[in-house]
């Protein structure tokens, strides 16, 4: 079975919204002050190991606008890898190797996980990630935590009456105070 990994950039106070300059957040681009070569290298290795990318429409549009314009090994991998986009409105994705999942999302993603192969990485995509969590489809969380507090914004983990146990499987610093913590559901 292919592991499904939620990999996100997050502030110390849990905000995942607008790390890369997306409009609408008062502190948009908060990751730039800390994203050094070690953090980029970590993300590159993650992308090389991934079989495919799974994103929601908003993240897809942000990525599809940025990555095709970039060059280098990281951009080449992002542009070439298979991408699955969950959307009820996107019809004709223009980014290379992108397909759209429009209906029966949870069964479709469960089917993607079946069989042998590399990880399916969910980047950003808060609403999608929360749906995957609710249906217990997440095999691993990779939280790249930045040493900054932004006070408000959308968070990965929703308010819930449920208790969910996680087991820390790895922790490493990737420069400038950025820590990657990897957890698996217990």
Image: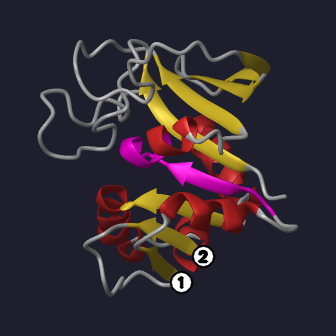
Quickly name the residue at label 1.
Answer: 97
Secondary structure beneath label 1: loop
The percent position of residue 102, horizontal first and vertical second, equals: 40, 73
Query: What residue is rendered at 31% in x and 83% in y?
Result: 91
Residue 121 got which mark?
none
Q: Quadrant of residue 160?
A: top left
Q: Is residue 124 magenta?
A: yes
Distance from the alpha carbon under mark 2 to that under mark 1: 5 Å
User: In the depicted view, which residue is nearer to us: 15 or 111?
Assistant: 111
Q: Earlier in the sequence, mark 2 or mark 1?
A: 2
Q: Against 44, is 38 above or below?
A: above
- Bounds of the magenta segment: 118-129
Any magenta on residue 56? no
Q: Which residue is mark 2?
A: 82
Where does the image place residue 89, in percent across and percent down from the top left?
Answer: 25, 73
Left or right: 44 with respect to 99?
A: right
Residue drawn where x is 23% and y is 12% of the image? 151
Please report the residue visible at 61 percent of the width from the left and 47 percent of the height from the top.
43
Please state, as top left, top right, bottom left or bottom right, where the N terminus lies in the image. bottom right
Q: Residues within 10 Å of mark 2 (few under 14, many from 20)?
A: some
Q: Residue at x 29, y 57 (%)?
A: 58
- Residue 15 at x, y percent in the picture: 35, 24
Q: Secondary structure at mark 2?
A: loop
Q: Nearer the viewer, residue 173 or 12?
A: 12
Residue 45 vs residue 104, the one in the foreground: 104
Asked if marks 2 and 1 touch (Cβ < 8 Å), the reply is: yes
Foreground residue, 99 or 46?
A: 99
Position of residue 145 in the picture relative to residue 127 (left or right): right
Crowding around mark 1 (Cα neighbors within 10 Å: few <14, some 14 to 19, many 20+) is few
The x and y percentages for residue 93 are 36, 82
């Amino acid at each position: 079975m292919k592991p499904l990994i939620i990999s996100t950039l997050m502030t110390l106070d849990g905000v995942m919204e607008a790390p890369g300059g997306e409009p609408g957040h008062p502190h948009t681009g908060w990751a730039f002050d800390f994203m050094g070569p070690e953090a980029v290298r970590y993300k590159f290795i993650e992308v090389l190991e991934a079989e495919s990318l799974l994103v929601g429409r908003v993240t897809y549009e942000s990525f599809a606008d940025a990555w095709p314009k970039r060059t280098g090994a990281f951009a080449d991998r992002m542009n070439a890898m298979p991408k699955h986009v969950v959307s009820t409105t996107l019809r004709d994705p223009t980014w290379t190797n992108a397909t759209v999942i429009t209906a029966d999302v949870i069964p479709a993603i469960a089917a993607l996980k079946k069989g042998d192969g590399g990880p399916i990485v969910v980047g950003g995509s808060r609403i999608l990630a929360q749906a995957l969590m609710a249906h217990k489809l997440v095999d691993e969380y990779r939280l790249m935590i930045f040493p900054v507090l932004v006070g408000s914004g959308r968070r990965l983990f929703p308010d819930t009456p449920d208790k969910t146990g996680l087991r820390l499987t790895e922790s490493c610093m990737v420069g400038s105070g950025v820590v990657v913590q990897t957890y698996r559901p217990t």
